[in-house]
Image (cartoon, helix red, strand yellow):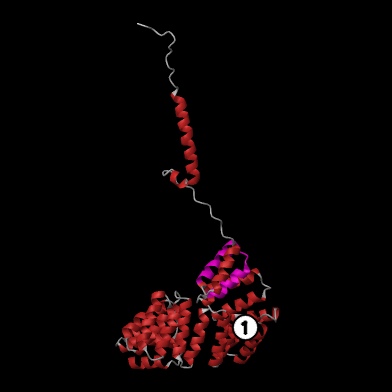
């Protein structure tokens, strides 16, 4: 057998070199994939850290509040101004705006706290004093409102809002001539302020000059077309003139601006009642209570409609809710009392009739109810 002495066995390749090469290629592919599609390689058992978001500044909230006010979204504006006061507790202007808007939204008691805070922070600011006068007036504190409004005018005789709110106080205290003088002064100082035109309209309204009042209110809506409560005021004057179609049209405009506010819906329902359509009134007033089950004026209005339709059980149900929510009116008390009387229940009716007489000792419906029970 021939043996080749020159043959040498083949060297075996080292496998670890191949593994290193494969690992290098896999690592490169993994790096590329992580760069291109990081979400595909996330560990499902590890909760990812939340992406940090910048905290909104007080200036951003202030801009949001002003934008919401111009758009007529008063609830959003109120929320934004609250954020401003949380971030800047010394922002008197934010408290003053909160006071205005809360008053418009039917929360005058909370508004009063905000108005006093604004004046406490800047006692020498005539505008904030004027806002405090406005809020005091809407809370029925007329004497204090008068004092603050006069102080604001003395502090800054050229402040249009000070004169406008003073006019409102004069009107509510029955001094209609002085009210008109102050309202006209306010207009001469600033005819581009919707609050000034609104108060001018209010003074004309209490004087019974409904057509002029409508024009003043509509002028305010030209300056800011998204203030629902001013459309309601203008519609109220059309209502006083017996022009119910025009009144309802303006109330519907207010509802389109603030669909989540029961006030425009309530105004529509009450207008239908005054126009002689109680059935439509009931439907609209019930819608108002669907929007806000705690809206007291709608309970009062609905109770009145039921009373006229002689639905005395319905009167008792809704007017007792109105009283529970703070309604303290002669008409509410005597309608409740008479409803019980007409249902042959003088025992429950007499206490309500006496409450009406406490507010007005000469209340004829209450006196007649007591006479029936005797």
Say left or right for 163 vs 274: right
> Does the magenta segment cover residue 11?
no
Residue lying at 39% horizontally and 86% vertically, measured from the top left: 304
Task: Mark yes or no: residue 87 visible.
Answer: yes
> Does the magenta segment cover residue 85?
yes
200 w.r.t. 73: above or below: below
Percent position of residue 96, x then y: 60, 72
Percent position of residue 280, x then y: 36, 85
Say left or right for 159 vs 314: right
Magenta region's main secondary structure? helix
Label total for image: 1
157 w.r.t. 175: above or below: above
Q: Secondary structure at mark 1?
A: helix
Q: Which residue is mark 1?
A: 164
Residue 83 image-quadrant placement? bottom right
The residue lying toward the viewer, choosing from 94 and 350, is 94
Percent position of residue 141, x then y: 56, 80
Q: Residue furthest left?
A: 344
What is the span of residues highlighted in magenta in the rendered image? Answer: 75-102
In what quadrant of the picture does the N terminus appear? top left
Label 1 environment density (alpha carbons within 10 Å; few <14, some 14–19, many ≥20)? many
124 w.r.t. 184: above or below: above
Percent position of residue 316, x then y: 35, 82
């Amino acid at each position: 057998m021939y043996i080749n002495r020159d043959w040498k066995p083949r060297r075996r390749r080292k496998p670890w070199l191949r593994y290193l090469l494969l690992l290098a290629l896999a690592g490169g592919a993994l790096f590329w994939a992580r760069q291109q599609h990081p979400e595909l390689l996330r560990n499902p058992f590890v909760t990812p850290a939340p992406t940090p978001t910048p905290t909104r500044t007080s200036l951003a909230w202030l801009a949001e509040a002003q934008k919401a006010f111009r758009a007529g979204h008063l609830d959003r504006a109120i929320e934004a101004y609250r954020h401003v006061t949380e971030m800047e507790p010394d922002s008197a202007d934010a408290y003053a705006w909160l006071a205005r808007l809360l008053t418009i939204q039917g929360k005058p008691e909370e508004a009063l706290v905000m108005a006093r805070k604004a004046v406490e922070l800047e006692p020498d600011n005539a505008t904030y004093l004027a806002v405090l006068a406005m809020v005091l007036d809407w809370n029925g504190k007329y004497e204090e409102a008068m004092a603050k409004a006069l102080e604001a005018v003395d502090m800054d005789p050229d402040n249009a809002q000070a004169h406008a709110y003073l006019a409102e106080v004069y009107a509510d205290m029955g001094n209609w001539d002085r009210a008109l003088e102050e309202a006209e002064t306010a207009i001469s100082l600033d005819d581009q302020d919707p609050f000034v035109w609104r108060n001018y309209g209010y003074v004309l309204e209490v004087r019974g000059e409904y057509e002029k009042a409508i024009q003043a209110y509509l002028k305010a809506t030209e300056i800011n077309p998204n203030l629902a409560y001013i459309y309601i005021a203008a519609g109220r004057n059309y209502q006083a003139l017996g022009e119910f179609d025009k009144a309802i049209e303006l109330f519907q405009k207010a509802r389109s601006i603030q669909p989540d506010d029961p006030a425009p819906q309530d105004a529509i329902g009450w207008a239908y009642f005054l126009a002689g359509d109680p059935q439509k009134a009931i439907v609209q007033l019930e819608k108002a209570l669907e929007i806000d089950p705690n809206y007291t004026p709608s309970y009062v209005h609905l109770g009145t409609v039921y009373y006229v339709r002689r639905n005395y059980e319905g009167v008792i149900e809704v007017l007792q809710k109105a009283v529970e929510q703070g309604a303290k009116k002669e008409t509410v008390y005597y309608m409740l009392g008479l409803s019980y009387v007409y249902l042959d229940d003088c025992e429950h009716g007499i206490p309500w009739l006496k409450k009406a007489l406490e507010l007005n000792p000469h209340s004829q419906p209450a006196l007649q109810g007591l006479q029936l029970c005797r």
